[in-house]
Image: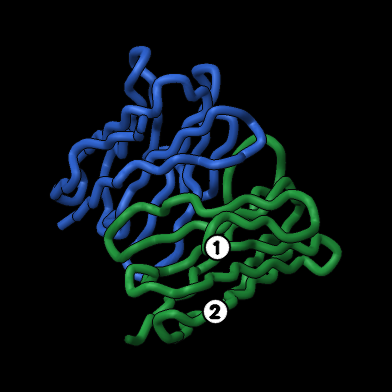
């Protein structure tokens, strides 16, 4: 069964450093998303991406964040200068169509900022 | 604003039935989802409702009333592996994000 994959599974970085989180969505999916979940809190939407551009972003997704689809398979989230409060689990998700149905989530990357 | 409410925790017994309620107030509505999330893992899709009524899928059923802004997830024949958080989530518009509730942590007792 096809699945969304994410690397690395765990990333530790120092405050102020740049990190890139990588995702490989399911191959025939067209819509891509990043969510984050701070430990013990709810899953929060960050950004959605379609047709090589951002279609929606949340208030959390400020100028420190960017997304890119550098080739036909990868989808990345970059945090330019990490802060302590960026420590969270970051989930990539993809879906086949626009109705929002059945977004498939990757296993997540646990980001720890020290 | 967007608001999704569900109980924080529930406890049920193995083999029993449990109903997890969810109420929502969102700027728009293009469907309601239920996801299961085990600790430290990603959410996994359980169900999707966009029309009023009951959707049944094996041991799990989900109900929606759009006029009441209400949904429930019904789990039958509970198994120990059903111990997890159950996330109610709404897609407010056609195109994009899912807004999640805080989740209901379900404890199953033997």
Give the CA distance from mark 2 to mark 1: 10 Å
Secondary structure type for disc 2: strand
Q: Which quadrant of the figure has residue A101?
A: top right
The chain to which mark 2 is attached is B
Regarding residue B99, the answer to whether it shows in the image is: no
Residue A69, x across and y down, in percent = 38, 20
Which residue is painted at 44% across and 80% down in the image?
B15
Residue A73, x across and y down, in percent = 34, 18
Residue B80, x across and y down, in percent = 33, 74
> Within 10 angstroms of label 2, few (less than 14), some, or many (20 or more) residues?
some
Residue A105, x across and y down, in percent = 40, 43
The chain to which mark 1 is attached is B
Regarding residue B66, the answer to whether it shows in the image is: yes
Which residue is painted at 42% across and 86% down in the image?
B13
Q: Tell me, what hue is chain B?
A: green
**Callouts 2 and 1 on one subunit:** yes
Which residue is painted at 39% across and 32% down in the image?
A66
Marking on residue B60: 1
Instruction: Tell me which label, 2 or 1, sits earlier in the chain.
Output: 2
Q: Is residue A108 above or below residue B23?
A: above
> Is residue B77 toward the left or the right of residue B110 in the image?
right
Q: Which quadrant of the figure has residue A86?
A: bottom left
> Is residue B52 toward the left or the right of residue B105 in the image?
right
Marking on residue B18: 2
Residue A100 or A46: which is nearer the viewer?
A100
Residue B110 or B64: which is nearer the viewer?
B110
The quarter of the image holding the N terminus of chain B is bottom right
Q: Residue furthest right?
A: B67
> Is residue A14 toward the left or the right of residue A46 in the image?
left
Q: Which chain is blue?
A: A
Secondary structure type for disc 1: strand
């Amino acid at each position: 069964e096809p699945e969304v994959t994410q690397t690395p599974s765990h990333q530790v970085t120092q405050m102020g450093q740049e990190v890139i989180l990588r995702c490989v969505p399911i191959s025939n999916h067209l819509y891509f998303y990043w969510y984050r979940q701070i430990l013990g809190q709810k899953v929060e939407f960050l950004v959605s991406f379609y047709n090589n551009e951002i279609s929606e972003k949340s208030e959390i997704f400020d100028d420190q964040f960017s997304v890119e689809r550098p080739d036909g398979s990868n989808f990345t989230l970059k945090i330019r200068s990490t802060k302590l409060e960026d420590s969270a689990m970051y989930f990539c998700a993809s879906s086949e169509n626009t109705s929002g149905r059945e977004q498939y989530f990757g296993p997540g990357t646990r980001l720890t900022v020290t | 604003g967007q608001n999704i409410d569900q109980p924080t925790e529930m406890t049920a017994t193995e083999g029993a039935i449990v109903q997890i309620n969810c109420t929502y107030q969102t700027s728009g509505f293009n469907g309601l989802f239920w996801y299961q999330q085990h600790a430290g893992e990603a959410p996994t899709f359980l169900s999707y409702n966009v029309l009023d009524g009951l959707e049944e899928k094996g041991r799990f059923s989900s109900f929606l009333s759009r006029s009441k802004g209400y949904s429930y997830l019904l789990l039958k024949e509970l198994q120990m592996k059903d111990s997890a958080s159950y996330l109610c989530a709404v897609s407010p518009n056609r195109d994009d994000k899912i807004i999640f509730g805080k989740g209901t942590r379900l404890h199953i007792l033997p």
